[in-house]
Amino acid sequence: GAVVSQHPSRVICKSGTSVKIECRSLDFQATTMFWYRQFPKQSLMLMATSNEGSKATYEQGVEKDKFLINHASLTLSTLTVTSAHPEDSSFYICSALRGAYNEQFFGPGTRLTVL
Amino acid sequence: SQQGEEDPQALSIQEGENATMNCSYKTSINNLQWYRQNSGRGLVHLILIRSNEREKHSGRLRVTLDTSKKSSSLLITASRAADTASYFCATDAQGAQKLVFGQGTRLTINP
C-alpha cells in the first residue's frame, strides 16, 4: 500500500507557458499533500503544503501566484507552474501524508525542462 | 531551511560490507524518517522511528535514535550493489506535519 503517482514524469515546455503536474494517492486518502523541489545533487526543498478543501500553505520565498496548488479531492493535488521560465526547470516531487505518525509517501517525481 | 545534517556526504564501500550513515537535527521531533532515492527517481520510504523509540529494524536496515544527542543512524548490513542510492533523513518538528530533510548521503556499493 501507500502508492503515490505523479503525472507527467517528464515535461519539456517553452518559456512563458504553464505546466500542470498531478499527484495522486492511489490506495489511500490524503488530506494533506506536499510539493517539493529538488535541484541536481541537492536535497528536497519544501515548496508548499496542500490541504484538501482549503488554500495551500506556501514556504517562505515561494511565490503562490507562480506555483498554483489545488487539492480538490482526497486523492489528487495539482501543481501548476505558471508562465514558466528556464529557472523553473527542476525536479518536482509530491508526497502524501498517511497515518497517525506523519508518514509521507512520495511520488516518482516530474522532471520539468523549460526552454 | 534544512534542519538535518548528514554525514558522510558520500560513502563508497565494497559489496558485502556494512554502511553506516548519520543524521543530526536541531529541534525536538515527533518522528524521524529515512528515505532512499535512486538517481532521478522519487523517494522510497524506508523506516519511521518515533521519538520514544531507540532502535528499529527492517530487514537489513537498522535505525537508531538518540534524542538526547538529536541524532540518528542508519545501518545497512551486507550491502548490495542495488543499495547504491542517496539516503535522506527527515524530521517533523513537534506540532508540525511537514518534514525537513537532511542533505543526504550518496552511497556507492562497489561490486
Image (cartoon, grey):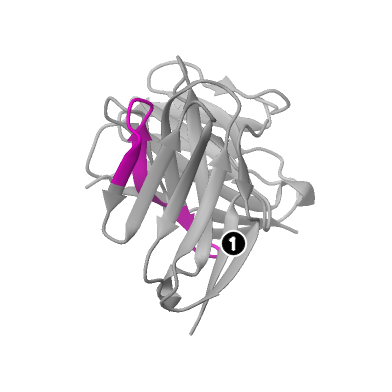
According to the picture, the residue beneath numbered tag 1 turns out to be B106
Going by the image, does B7 lie left or right of B32? right
Q: Residue at x 49, y 70 (%)?
A: B84
Question: Pointer 1 indicates a residue of which chain?
Answer: B
The one of A18 and B42 positioned closer to us in this rendering? B42
Q: Position of residue A13 (x, y in %)?
A: 66, 56
Residue B53 within the segment the image draws in magenta: yes
Q: Position of residue B46 (x, y in %)?
A: 36, 50
Q: Residue at x 47, y 46 (%)?
A: B73
The correct choice, above or below, for B3 with respect to B57 in the image is above
Residue A8 seen from this side:
no
Q: Residue at x 46, y 17 (%)?
A: B94
The one of A93 and B96 positioned closer to us in this rendering? B96
Quadrant where the N terminus of chain B sits is top right
The correct choice, above or below, for A47 with respect to B76 in the image is above
Residue range of the region highlighted in magenta in the rendering: B36-56
Q: Mark 1: which amino acid? A: Arg
The one of A35 and A11 positioned closer to us in this rendering? A35
